[in-house]
Amino acid sequence: MKLLMMGPPGAGKGTQAKKIVGDYHLSNISTGEMFRDSYRKKESLGLLAMEFIRDGHLVSDEITIEIVRRRLFESNKEKNFLLDGFPRTIFQAEALADMLDVMQSSLDAVIQIVVSDDVILTRMVGRRSCSICGATYHLDFKPPKVENVCDSCGGVLYQREDDKRESVKNRLDIYKIKTQPLIEYYKSRGLLYEVDGEKSFEGVYQEIKAVLEGLA
Ligand code: ADP
Ligand code: AMP
């Protein structure tokens, strides 16, 4: 199965993606996570990407497409995957379509998590991430067992630079201009499935699961 998880920043894509890839045995390809991981390792790619990420801008199409291309072709074993956070522009979507053509493959579904701006803001500003494994928490909706400590690996939790209020507005504006047109792009190709992202963690998951069961 080849899936795309779409929705505004803070909609809950990463949270749902982690559960889906576990249950459906898919590779989780999150471009945001790849950039942050590279930054943690102090690689030049991560250091360069963070210059854009920090202020809420998109990393260039060229760089982003290249890291996805490498990931998809490198091992040639990414037969079942879930893309989270890619594509974010029409140009990236066209590049993905070309890559899938070369792989003689195609997407099965694009899941769009629908949430209002108010909910997005609350979710992003309250998000805390693990500095070691990248797991995400929320101060109110998913607090860790011990304050500021990751339940999974014991890492210290931090607030992403781009989750601070100043960047959040930028990210939402950019989402509306550059990424939202993808909804129509995938709808016109008969691939788009919308789910109500304002439900509970489990409620959203059940909606996604119903879509995936319907594909089989
Ligand atoms: P995205 O990957 O779309 O940017 P995340 O999955 O990281 O979003 O979720 C953003 C924040 O919202 C996180 O702090 C997460 O714990 C919280 N969150 C995600 N889904 C829900 C939900 N259904 N209800 C309440 N909070 C949620
Ligand atoms: P995310 O973890 O998906 O919220 O992504 C965090 C940040 O990484 C985004 O705000 C962008 O700056 C950058 N990023 C992630 N994916 C892409 C992409 N497909 N295109 C451009 N920039 C991206």
Image: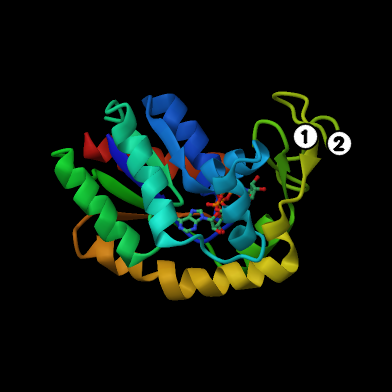
Element type at mark 1? loop
Q: Which mark is residue 147?
A: 2
Q: Is mark 2 within 8 Å of ligand 1?
A: no
Element type at mark 2? loop
Q: How far across and down, in percent of the image, does residue 162 sit?
A: 67, 59
Question: Badge 2: how crowded within 10 Å, few (<14), some, or many (20+)?
Answer: few
Along the horizontal axis of the image, is 71 left or right of 52?
A: left
Q: How far across and down, in percent of the image, does residue 158 sit?
A: 78, 44
- The span from disc 1 to disc 2 (Cα, nearest Å) is 6 Å
Question: Badge 1: how crowded within 10 Å, few (<14), some, or many (20+)?
Answer: some
- Asked if 63 appears above or below 177 in the picture, the reply is above
Q: How far across and down, in percent of the image, does residue 150 sit?
A: 75, 31
**Which kind of residue does numbered mark 2 sit on?**
Glu
The residue sitting at 72% across, 70% down in the picture is 166
Question: Given contact means CB atoms under 8 Å apart, are the residues at marks 1 and 2 in contact?
Answer: yes
**Rendered-image quadrant of the N terminus:** top left
Most distant residue in the right direction: 147
Q: Is mark 1 within 8 Å of ligand 1?
A: no
Residue at label 1?
A: 144
Along the horizontal axis of the image, is 143 left or right of 194?
A: right
**Which quadrant would residue 29 be assigned to in this image?**
top left
- Asked if 124 appears above or below 28 in the picture, the reply is below
The residue sitting at 86% across, 36% down in the picture is 147
On the question of residue 130 being in view, the answer is yes
**Which quadrant would residue 146 be assigned to in this image?**
top right
**Which quadrant would residue 62 be assigned to in this image?**
bottom left
On the question of residue 200 being in view, the answer is no
The residue sitting at 38% across, 64% down in the picture is 89
Q: How far across and down, in percent of the image, does residue 175 sit?
A: 49, 68
Q: Which mark is residue 16?
A: none
The residue sitting at 15% across, 46% down in the picture is 101
